[in-house]
Amino acid sequence: MEPPEFGQALAELALSGFEDYVNKTLPLELKLDADFAEEFHGADHSRVNLAFRRWQRRVYAYANRDIYPESQLSADVLEGGWQSEFLAGGWARSMPLKEVNYSWPQLRQSSEFRKLQSHISELAKLYLKRSGSSFGNKFRIFTWAEVFRKGDALRPSAHTDGGLFMGRYWPQLKKNSLKFNFEDPRGINPPFGKTHTHSIEEGAMSMFPIWASHFITPNMKSRTAVCYAFIVYPEDGNTMDFEDDGTGKFKIERVPLK
């Protein structure tokens, strides 16, 4: 358990970094990267947070040069290194821009962020034990901030890039402002195809299978919501095949009451 000040500090760091990205970095990326600009302008309401995550991926890549050696950083850091698909995703084909600063020391060097990473690492051991998986006691954790202003949402997504599981922590959230929904992985035809809403509140953290498609509904309140999403990877990179995830083998049986 952490005091409210812990979440407040992380929320302020995320909001400050987000505003700096939106006002300074994003306009520069749109000006200098034509492919990115074309895709961004044709995207939906998720585009700002997705672009922010794209930038944070490169911040992470530059801070983990054992995955992305110095010789690879002149190319696309999201496609370099011995684990070529590690953290790859939308807009990965774009080259990093020399005019853009890919660092966020205010967040990464803060005691609150380091403590958050430590909590995630400890909870990862419990999650993996309960799901029947064993990947040691050390992990690589990619954590990124998302900011949901009034009307902001996040489209459905799932990740199958070699991670062990995903999670979300909400340091700032007004009650009933948005919904955190999961889609049925069994398809859209009845009796399947239903959407499950996972209850969230300020200060809550949830962990779930990386392959589970989920989305965030629009923030209906004036107070900005802040989320730290994270993916936990094996120590040696993206070596987990999502088809081997133990959570995909869970079976639920209905036992009649006696």
Image (tube, rainbow, N blue to C red):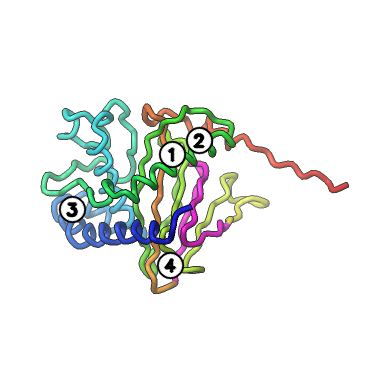
Q: Secondary structure at mark 3?
A: helix
Identified at 41% across, 62% down, the residue is 172
Location of residue 155 by image quarter: bottom left
The residue that disc 3 covers is 29
Asked if disc 3 and disc 4 are in contact, CB closer than 8 Å, the reply is no
Amino acid identity at mark 3: Glu
Task: Using a 10 Å C-alpha cutoff, classify the residue at mark 3 as few (fewer than 14 neighbours), some (14 to 19) or many (20 or more).
Answer: some
Could you tell whether 14 is left or right of 197 in the image?
Answer: left
Front tag of 3 and 4: 4
CA separation, marks 4 and 1? Answer: 29 Å
2 or 4: tag closer to the N-terminus: 2
4 or 1: tag closer to the N-terminus: 1
The residue that disc 2 covers is 125
Asked if disc 4 and disc 1 are in contact, CB closer than 8 Å, the reply is no
The residue that disc 1 covers is 121
CA separation, marks 1 and 2? Answer: 7 Å
Observer-nearest of 147 and 188: 147
Task: Using a 10 Å C-alpha cutoff, classify the residue at mark 4 as few (fewer than 14 neighbours), some (14 to 19) or many (20 or more).
Answer: many
Could you tell whether 195 is left or right of 104 in the image?
Answer: right
Whole-percent x and y of residue 167? Answer: 46, 47
Q: Secondary structure at mark 2?
A: helix
Q: Magenta region: which residues?
A: 197-220
Front tag of 2 and 4: 2
Task: Using a 10 Å C-alpha cutoff, classify the residue at mark 2 as few (fewer than 14 neighbours), some (14 to 19) or many (20 or more).
Answer: some
Identified at 64% across, 37% down, the residue is 250
The residue that disc 4 covers is 219
Asked if disc 3 and disc 2 are in contact, CB closer than 8 Å, the reply is no
Observer-nearest of 212 and 256: 256
Whole-percent x and y of residue 112? Answer: 34, 51
Q: Secondary structure at mark 1?
A: helix
Asked if disc 3 and disc 1 are in contact, CB closer than 8 Å, the reply is no
Amino acid identity at mark 1: Ser
